[in-house]
Image (cartoon, rainbow, N blue to C red):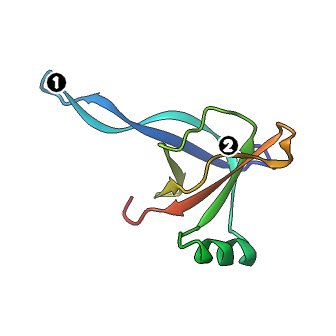
Amino acid sequence: MNEEFPHHVEFQIVGKVPDGGGGYKEDWVTVLDFNGFLDTPNSQELFQAQQLNYTLDRNLFYPYRTDVKEQMRCLFRYDSTVETYELVSKPQDQGGQRETMKLMLKLVPNG
């Protein structure tokens, strides 16, 4: 496992899945999975989020890529737990060097 990006995450979109009766229903479908680093926001980030009236629970850092979109949701599975996150920012290229991306996440209760 990569030491810099030790957490395996999945990204999902709403898509059509078979309903078992010959038709389809809408449900969340995994379209991306890769390793990243889930980190707790620092106090300055939490204060800024509070001032802008939005919730920030985690920052996700991951290797540069451009296929993560705002309409997706993020899943992090560990042990027997699944944490579901809503994206609260656009993916940001840290330092503009096309090396590491940052994404702000909000925990979805009972996601």
Q: Quadrant of the C terminus?
A: bottom left
Q: Residues within 10 Å of mark 1 (few under 14, many from 20)?
A: few
Q: Which residue is at a point 52% across and 41% down the rendered structure image?
A: 11
Q: Amino acid at mark 2?
A: Asn
Q: Nearer the viewer, residue 104 or 108?
A: 104
Q: Nearer the viewer, residue 29 or 87?
A: 87
**Secondary structure of the residue carrying numbered label 2:** strand
Check the image and name the residue furthest to the top: 22
Q: Is residue 57 left or right of residue 44?
A: left
Q: Which residue is at a point 74% across and 76% down the rendered structure image?
A: 44
The mark found on residue 23 in the picture is 1
Q: Amino acid at mark 1?
A: Gly
Percent x, y of residue 39:
70, 62
Q: Is residue 1 left or right of residue 91?
A: right
Q: Quadrant of the N terminus?
A: top right
Q: Name the mark nearer the viewer: 2 or 1.
A: 1
The mark found on residue 35 in the picture is 2
